[in-house]
Image (cartoon, coloured by chain):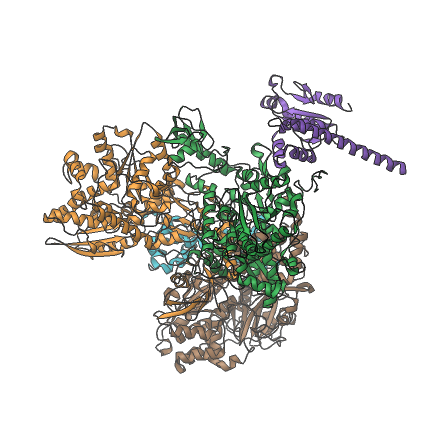
Amino acid sequence: MDNIKVTVDNITVEVPKGSTVLDAARAAGIYVPTLCHMDGHKSLGACRVCLAEVEGGRGLVASCAFPATDGMKVRTNTKRVHDARKTVVELMLSAHRQECLTCVRSLNCELQALAKMMGIQENRFQGAMPPELVDTSSPSVVRDSSKCILCRRCVTVCRDVQSVGQLFPVDRGFGTVIAPAAKKNLADVACVACGQCITACPVGALKEKSHKERVWAALNDPEKYVVVQTAPAVRAAIGEEFGMPAGSLVTKKMVAGLRRLGFDKVFDTDFTADLTILEEGNELLQRLKTGGVLPMITSCSPGWINFIEHFYPELLPHLSSCKSPQQMFGALAKTYYADKIGVKPENMFCVSIMPCTAKKLEAGRDEMCSVEDIPDVDAVLTTREAAQMMREMGVDFQRLPDETFDEPLGISTGAAVIFGATGGVMEAALRTVYEVVTGDDLKDVNFTAVRGLEGIKEATVKMVCVEGKGELDVKVAVASGLSNARKLMDLIMEGKADYHFIEIMCCPGGCIGGGGQPIPTTDEIRQKRIEAIYQEDEGLPVRKSHENPAVMALYKEFLGEPLGHQSHKLLHTKYTPRSMWPTDVPLDEEAKVK
Amino acid sequence: MCSESCGCSSDIVGIIEKYDSDKRNLIPLLHELQDELGYISPEVMETIAEKLGTTVGQVHGVATFYTLFYTKPRGKNIVRMCNSTACHIEGGRKIREAVSAALGIAPGETTQDGGFTLEVVSCMGLCGVAPAIMVNDDVYGNLTPEMVPNILGKYREAS
Amino acid sequence: MAINLTINGQAVAAEAGDTILTAARRAGVYIPTLCYHSDLMPDGVCRVCSVEVKGQRTLCAACCYPVAEGMEVLTHSPRVRESRRMIVELMLANHPQECLTCSRNSKCELQALAREFGIQEVHFKGERKMADVDTSSLSVFRNPEKCILCNRCVRTCEDIQSVAALHASKRGWDTTIVPGMGDELASVVCVNCGQCINRCPTGALTANDPSSKVWDAIHDSTKHVVVQTAPAVRAAIGEEFGMPAGSRVTGKMVTALKMMGFDRVMDTDFTADLTIMEEGSELIQRVTEGGVLPQLTSCSPGWIKFIEYYYPELLPHLSTCKSPQQMFGALAKTYYAEKTGIDPKDIISVSIMPCTAKKFECDRPEMTDSGYKDVDYVLTTREAAQMMREAGIDLPNLPESEYDDPLGMSTGAAVIFGNTGGVMEAALRTAYAIITGTELDNVNIEAVRGMEGVREATVMVGELPVKAAVAHGLANARQVLEGIKNGRFKDYHFIEIMCCPGGCIGGGGQPQPTSEEIRKARIKAIYDEDEAMTLRKSHTNPAVQKLYEEFLGKPLSHKSHELLHTDYTPRDRKTVKAVKVKVES
Amino acid sequence: MAFYRAHILVDTGTPAVLKGAMGMKSALVDEIKKRGLDKEIKVVETGDLGLHGVGLALIVYPEGVIYANITAQDVPEIVEEHLLKGRQVKRLVYTGPSSAVVDGAAKPRSREMRVILEHIGVIDPTSIDEYIAHGGYEAIAKALTQMTPEDVVAEVKASQLKGRGGAGFPTGLKWEFTAKADGENKAVVCNADEGEPGNFKDRLIMEGDPHQIIEGMIIAGYAVGAHEGYIYIRGEYHQSVSHTEKAIADAREAGLLGKDILGSGFDFDITIFKGAGAYICGEETALLESLEGRRGESRMKPPFPPTSGLMAAPTVINNVETLASVPRIIDRGADWYAGIGTEKSKGTKIFSPCGDVLYPGVYEVPFGVTLRDIIYNMAGGIKGGKRFKACLMGGPSGVLVGEDALDRRLCAEDLAPGAGALIVLDEDKCIVDLMQNCAEFFHHESCGQCVPCREGTKRILEVLNWWTTGAGSEDDLRLLEALGETMSLTSKCGLGQFAAVAFKSSLPLFRDEYLAHVKDKVCPAGVCAMDKVLEEVK
Amino acid sequence: MSSHTCECEAKAKAAQEEEARLYEELDVIIQKHKEVKGPLIQVLHAAQELFGWLPEKAQARIAKGLDVPLSEVHGVLSFYSFFTTVPRGKHTIRVCLGTACYVRGGKQVLEKFQQELGINVNNTTEDREFSLEVNRCVGACGLAPVVTVGPDIYRRVKVDKIPEIIKKYRGS
């Protein structure tokens, strides 16, 4: 590829043609502040924080968007640049509701950091504030336009990364707000609640709907027996909230931290992840045997469920009928476990800690009540919220001792842990399906073909059937991020998908990149968290779901067998076709489900 | 001990001389000097600070803490209106309004002619005869708003 | 005798005299605090450290509640958490929400607490206290709106510095911390030390920041901007970039300053060596010619202002030497200007100091011996770091560079000026050589090192027993001055006094927070730097020798006196006020 | 002591003076002189007789007849008829509900029992001789000559006397701690900074019988080994200061203060310290700060004053009423004292009902009488025949009780009486308005040192201001309740800890009234000018 | 009575049919523009011409037809002052408040229109005759103040001429 030479602040570097001025500055080791820029996405040059001076140019340029040319001379540290950047940030501040002290993003806010870095000490532009639009309608995402700096990073992730496209700038000039069509509420449009917009937001304009208070209330209530489950991806990320590097595996500290909060039992969603494999694996085998709808698609990612319900309702029969591990856990906690320890289901309070904001919506679905109208999962905390609760409790996370999950719902295998990463459910399922189909002992449990951050991965696994019916080539596909999911769905729609089994995760990288994870989340960080997940898997003695002794005991004591009657009642669910249009827009006939 | 330039009268010097250089004498000294001068001026605070070996800030901190001390000149007559709970439920607010109206000033203010300073105090221990006000050292209790102009009138004439 | 108690169910052994907080900290149990500061006596006013003690009707302030045998403490029970949150909410309700334009943004204890407690709403919507910012002082700005009345500044000024410039005034909700009688800071006795800033948890106290003027100078192509860095800065500025206390970053700092665009990056250490030459010679002169003894050091401007106000009668004891900062300034616009052929009127002299009093010092009318203002702008360590951040400089990852000539070369003796006892040790290293004609084998004079407030030592300089004392922190300085007055120090030769606890490394311009532990770490960094240097005695500094050769002649020469020495002004504590009164009337 | 055939005691308490007592008195003196009776009859100014709502009053001894509601015009008639001719002026004789002031003319119709107030209205408070003539200073003689300090402490402990300032800490225990504490320069401090609205009992004692306080203090000093005493009197109480000053001077002259008291070798002296207007100084550690010449900001506790008080020396701090009880206990014995009152509250207590009662005043009763007893039988019931609505027990820092509390007994085991104030409200009063006033009080009196109290009192006041002007919301109710809880739990001293107690206690009783204000924007009692202000806001 | 109901039903049916017809037409427009680059604004123009305004259902139809998120369709149309999402009057009166018009009394002109029509800016009279809007400069500054009614332009509008202008369009 052609390279060009660019000189930034007297340092000359060679960068590939097509690089921006920002790329060149970074290559020269020069820090240029940015705000609206997102690595990997085309820059809009909207925020003007990354201004630089190009020799011979008339004005200042937005370095993130301005193409570098051969021989270009750039200065990033002139007075003009400094003053202009400072003014830009000051202007942003003047239209930003200043309430850092009560903001969820305080001390983890890019605007706050910029203001600090630039040493801004006065707000020279004081006047009217832009329109204030607070939307608390969604069970997952809260929007507050008064803090929005219109960087449009949420627009980019919602439209380009997730292909959901519900957020867009509305109106213009000083009156511009980012909102769903016609400034409707998120609850009234086809938002999938994934929360990727939250992790993309540099400030506190987007945040999760907090369940912290209801958890504190339950913990403070002596009547309540409060159990908590933690999703696989949380352990690989929560350390970041306490200043640990990305990829720190802190499972046991996390357990200790949760005990400090006062939970009666600290359990693991991994337990029901193993259970999911048994149910879902058998469902797959059943579909294969009985000629059911194929490819079968995983159903453990609630954002993905929302997506298919809204955008591909006609493909719902492809979904596995299994509930997500979170909901399987909730259902079992309020039946099997409540019964076991003699606590009334209404006094059992079930909390889950999830890397996900869509889980909040999922837990509130009407169908997720196993005992009368009591929700199976009472509160869902994101990884961030759980960390915040620990801070409120004065937990010195890094110095916590190692503690282990409680039994029996805390016992799990490596197969369950990898649910946290894209391809993990597939790999876990293959480990079990392989052994069931072939009757062999799987020597190398690592199906590396389905690992990695690539958007769509495919693989074929050869299995020799134990029942002597010859070979079975299981064709699988894995996608993470909804725009990738959309590609696979379009293939199915076109009849071009000859897969048996597809794993889809709503968020890029799988749950480790979920909308409830620590901010920031970048590809580099996602990769580190994935490594931590596989590291945990490698370190576990049992790495196949069907070998989980607690799961086996559960079947023996309570469920009977996979896909049995009890399983269907508690662990499986149905889906609802929905519209991709706002609820109050009359549906076209053709848009309705076929 | 007190330089001529500070403008202290010999009376004040006399008062100050009576006390030991003990910080514990600060409040009694402030009382006595205020009785003499009507208020506690910055110069007085400085003199006291020097006398007691403390800082002006400390003296100022104390003088501003207690409601009976004044760091600004006040009117010839001090009208204290009680805002205690007992006075309040017996109609203290109406009395306060009547006094304010009669003098044309709000609590904390002094009339233009320097005749009256108006203050609201928390409780004067006159709950038995509520509502009550004090003008200088004279006490008036069981008041009705109609009585107010007469009472104040007496002092206006006197001064 | 150990006292046994439990904290959150965990058995803890404490000592008699422990508070719940000290016992908890020792046991590794975290309790949030705000008005508490390890340098100060607890005051128990913020109530953020409230904990539940079994059997007590109310919660107890852990910072001042003594432990007792069998006590059962809960640090994060629901009612404790609820109460703390409510308390911080109350503070927030009366605090301006302007973090984004606050100099303490991201380094504010109130902000950190609000985040720790997860406060997302202030339920109280009433009045907020309004006040004007007091920018009268050359060193310390006060913004009473941001004050949370923790009293740390009051306790600092009174207990550590014995100046008591700040006080609570009025009462209840109207309480404000004010200088004197509610005056501006400039019209009361304040020594500009900035220790109050160091201990302020919020942005209520900040330094007078000239950085925009410095930027203007840097960006002005007609100006030649030279910068000097004080010894203590290099041992602390790393903290501003997240490095642990005690990180030595001299070379990186020089690189950063060059990147910022200073034309020459030179070192106050050079004039520290020069100070030793002048001050040492002065001492020898006083001893041999029967001058006023003990001689007191004069390099700490907060200290100078203190003695001018409180002990004007003892001014003859002060060495006539200017501080290294001012010596540097005077030389920059004479010697350096001459050498480089730059018109001194085009030279802008900037210094980076651990100190806020230096901002006052450079403005003293007598500090213009070069014919210009010797030092134009003084930046604190914090402000220098902020300017680096503004320039996008990531200090910890910079390569190292050397100081520029000719005022950049220095010795280990100069480096240790940064901590208490350092000037004394440096002086003794040189005095030994001058008096005995031989060089010290072991230049580490442990007798004058350490952290005690007042230290005394007799050091044998050859046959001569030199009696020396060292004090740091003005309350300790006051003790020494009283000692001089009552004769306790009458046969002493030389006394070093530093205004701030720990010496300049603990200065009012240094990174926040400050604590004994942090100061010790910085001191260690300073001594490590000294150890690492080849030249460790001021008189061996070749650049200083050259300066005498080329320019000054010899120590205490006429030229030296003209440029490097000064006079002091007895100050009347009342006149500060008198001026103010006149203005009012 | 000259002999007079009759004494006339004129009520010259602060309230009486404002009604013209001094004029009446001089008329009386002139009249007596005119009639040449000045060698036979002595006119004495007493302090407050505790008879409020009866106009000017005087008592004629030896008969002990009380004349009430008199004017200067009545004087010649009284002198002529009673003093000259020996006929009582029937139309002026006082027969009110609480005529226990003297044993004579009217029989007490209530359960009033005067122990501390025994001499009030009986003796000339400015005369040490009269005090002595009535058995004064016998207790100190007894203590110094017949008892060891330990005996005294034991006696006070046995009496089960508890502090009368509101907190009710056992006095004997406090003395014992102080006696046993190591330290030079121990001190006895009399807390006479009576600043709680509704309380004026201490003023009455100081104005009417200052010597018993002095005697109590000397006994305390002897018991704990202190040689200095301080009386911290509210700066507003001028007459209290002058009477007490006179009493101290007289006692000193009589050898009852100073070196070697009564030849016992025990030294003790008392200094009066005039407060300067800060309710917080009623809090003992703030009082100590004030005594030491500083801002009245409370100290950290522990250490408590008995181990580290005035200038860090062990210090006993007792309320006026507490100290005034001591001579009687020593005199008549702990058993006698402990025989009065209830199981947990021994002795007598002075109450000062005020507000919407017919006869506000000061009434001393044994612990255990009911609230109804005091309000209806002694204070004459509610003014204008209105209905009782509520009573603020002990002032703004106490609890608010409603009608159902009327038959509760005033003692530790039932209804804790606080310092003694009983602010009574009739049916026309508004609770929210009352709380707004209480909030104003605490906002004004908070020392401003600790966060929960300084900021909390402000916010409570603001919210109540909104409520009383129709600008409140229901959420505020929960908010204030939570705020009150935090203030109680975390404030540094009692002021903040109790500042929201009245509000919290009023919530369950009068929730409907609050809701009317915050939801319906109506003041049921019609006190709050909500509509007017709402109009202005619009 | 019954005949009245019938009439109503008939009216409603006619309206429904009319709407269906309009949407069919819209679909044709969308199909026509689909292959063009950046078709959205062209389609929105056509659609507004068709409906007189841009009902949400039409926006959804466009979004679906052009395969862009509805939020984007709305975001774009809300950017341009020409597009409207509320039904318009038969005649749209636009008063120019560009700088030149403003200083020559544009504001007074606007006020007069508001007064005469009894509506505020961006509203439509109850009889659906007039909508009132403001625009910023139509490029006729030399003839300020300028008012446009539909395609007609009025220059140097005097306040007292305004009733006349309105009258001209009323009922037409």
Residue E171 point in image, percent of width and height: 78, 24
Residue A537 point in image, percent of width and height: 47, 54
Q: Colour of chain D?
A: brown
Residue C322 point in image, percent of width and height: 23, 42
The chain shown in green is which?
A
- Residue D52 in view, yes or no: no
Q: Is residue A138 above or below residue D374?
A: above
Q: Is residue A17 above or below residue C85?
A: above
In the depicted view, which residue is nearer to us: A489 or C17? A489
Quarter containing the C terminus of chain A? top right
Quadrant for residue A145, please give it.
top right
Quadrant for residue E107, please give it.
top right
The chain shown in purple is which?
E
Q: Colour of chain B?
A: cyan
Residue E40 point in image, percent of width and height: 63, 29
User: Is C314 situated left or right of C99 in this image?
Assistant: left
In the depicted view, which residue is nearer to us: A370 or A88? A370
Q: Colour of chain C?
A: orange
Furthest-top residue in view? E142
Q: How many numbered tags mark residues here?
A: 0
Q: Is residue C240 above or below residue C216?
A: below
In the depicted view, which residue is nearer to us: A315 or D487? A315
Quarter containing the N terminus of chain A? top left
- Residue A546 in view, yes or no: yes
